[in-house]
Amino acid sequence: MRQAGMLGELLAEFLGTMVLILFGAGVVAMVLLFGTGVPGEVVKGGWTNINLGWGLGVTMGIYVAGGISGAHINPAVTLALAAFRGFPWKKVIPYMLAQTAGAFLGAALVYWNYIPAFRKADPLLDHTAGVFATFPAFPETLSAGLLDQILGTALLVLLIFAITDPRNQAPVANLAPVAIGLIVVAIGVSFGGMHGYAINPARDFGPRLWTVVAGFKNNGLTSGQPVYWVPIIGPLVGGLIGGLVYDQGIRRFLPTQA
């Protein structure tokens, strides 16, 4: 069997993250760009569909990349795996760059697909950057969004470690992507309001870079309040906390494998 090698792993992370963004940003575009202006209108399934779309995007991205790279598709997961599961540190930055690049391309493809809708709903591109990137519900209190990102990503990594740990319970490998997608749905349902539950630096920063290239105003990086750092720092810190909590609170009490 041909070994994937570093190039194959990076390509898998690139494509897996691209798939994640295609579904995730795609469902947000469906909800935000096709309203008719009726008060109280639920557009294309609203928040429910957004959560389902992102969860399914994670599941499909993992199925794409899992057999080659392990399908981190999230720098916070990559960092936690390096800190707690022996993932090589020399691969951390390349994986993160591949994930961010995949997210950038995914966002570009979503924009290309929905150009007529963007031109109709936001011809000046001044209020729809949220299709691609996350923004705080309370911009005057960024610490609230930072806490939200730390907590949400801690939950994500803690639960990923629990699901994939053979010492905890025998995982059914082909169903693990479904379970991880459901984790994302659960986090979105319970913690999605404060800062859009990026819980993934690449998922936010790659598409945010696309908004800059495409000329979106109020993009949180080069225009409007600079909030881009919150869904980068928060998830990286939260992922480490989640991994530490699982290992110290659960894994060290599990029986070692024979």
Image (cartoon, rainbow, N blue to C red):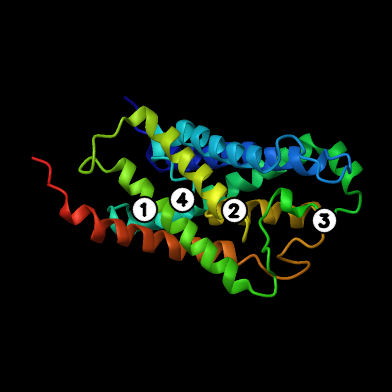
Q: Which residue is mark 4?
A: 95
Q: Could you tell me which residue is drawn at 79 percent across and 52 percent down?
A: 128
**Label 1 vs 4, first from the N-terminus:** 4
Q: Could you tell me which residue is drawn at 48 percent across and 31 percent down?
A: 64
The span from disc 4 to disc 3 (Cα, nearest Å) is 31 Å
Dot 4 lies on which element? helix
**Label 2 vs 3, first from the N-terminus:** 3
Q: Quadrant of residue 72?
A: top left
Residue 108, x across and y down, in percent: 71, 43
Q: Kindly identify which numbered label has been placed on residue 127.
A: 3
In the picture, measured across the screen, residue 27 lies left or right of residue 181, that is right
Q: Which residue is mark 1?
A: 158
Kind of residue sitting beneath label 3: His
- In this view of the protein, can residue 185 be seen by the observer? yes
The span from disc 2 to disc 4 (Cα, nearest Å) is 26 Å
Q: Check the picture and name the quadrant holding the N terminus.
A: top left
Dot 1 lies on which element? helix
Q: Kindly identify which numbered label has been placed on residue 192.
A: 2
Kind of residue sitting beneath label 4: Tyr
The reply to whether callout 1 and callout 4 are in contact (CB within 8 Å) is: no
The span from disc 1 to disc 2 (Cα, nearest Å) is 18 Å
The reply to whether callout 1 and callout 3 are in contact (CB within 8 Å) is: no
